[in-house]
Image (tube, rainbow, N blue to C red):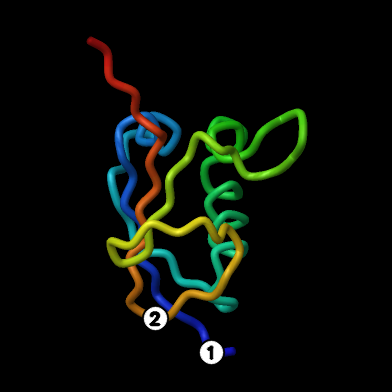
Amino acid sequence: MAGARIRVEYFPGIIQATGGRRSETVELADPTLAALWRELVTRYGRPFEDLLFDSSTGKFSRYIIISINGVLTHDREGPLQDGDEVAVSPILSGGG
């Protein structure tokens, strides 16, 4: 599989773990969501990892929403294509 440049957008709640970065382009030799998470955890360390993964199970947190090119996805490991935009957001709750 050929490499790809992926645009990643971070929403409030995630931005703190990226040192204030709201977006970036990540180059991946293996363009998959799984490879993207590995790269981002390498860049941002434990705070980012703790947001993405449930520490008790090691699985992707159910409190994180992922969209690819504006479409929500439940896939956390699947393929990406050059030029894709991946948005990472915590689930937001409202109060009344």
What is the x, y in percent for residue 56?
Answer: 76, 29
- The secondary structure type at the circle numbered 1 is loop
Instruction: Decide: is 33 above or below 21.
Output: below
Image coordinates for residue 67, horizontal then vertical, percent: 38, 57
Q: Residue at x 32, y 35 (%)?
A: 20
The amino acid sitting under disc 2 is: Asp
In space, the residues marked 1 and 2 are separated at their CA atoms by 9 Å
- Residue carrying label 1: 2
Residue sitting at x 35%, y 72%: 84
Callout 1 touching callout 2 (CB < 8 Å): yes
Q: Position of residue 61 (x, y in %)?
A: 59, 38
Task: Look at the picture and state if 71 lies above or below 80.
Answer: above
View extreme (bottom): residue:
2
Q: Amino acid at mark 1?
A: Ala
Name the residue beneath numbered marker 2: 82
Q: Secondary structure at mark 2?
A: loop
Looking at the image, residue 76 sits to the left or right of residue 80; the answer is right
Locate the C terminus and report the quarter of the image it occupies.
top left
Residue 70 x/y as whole percent: 28, 61
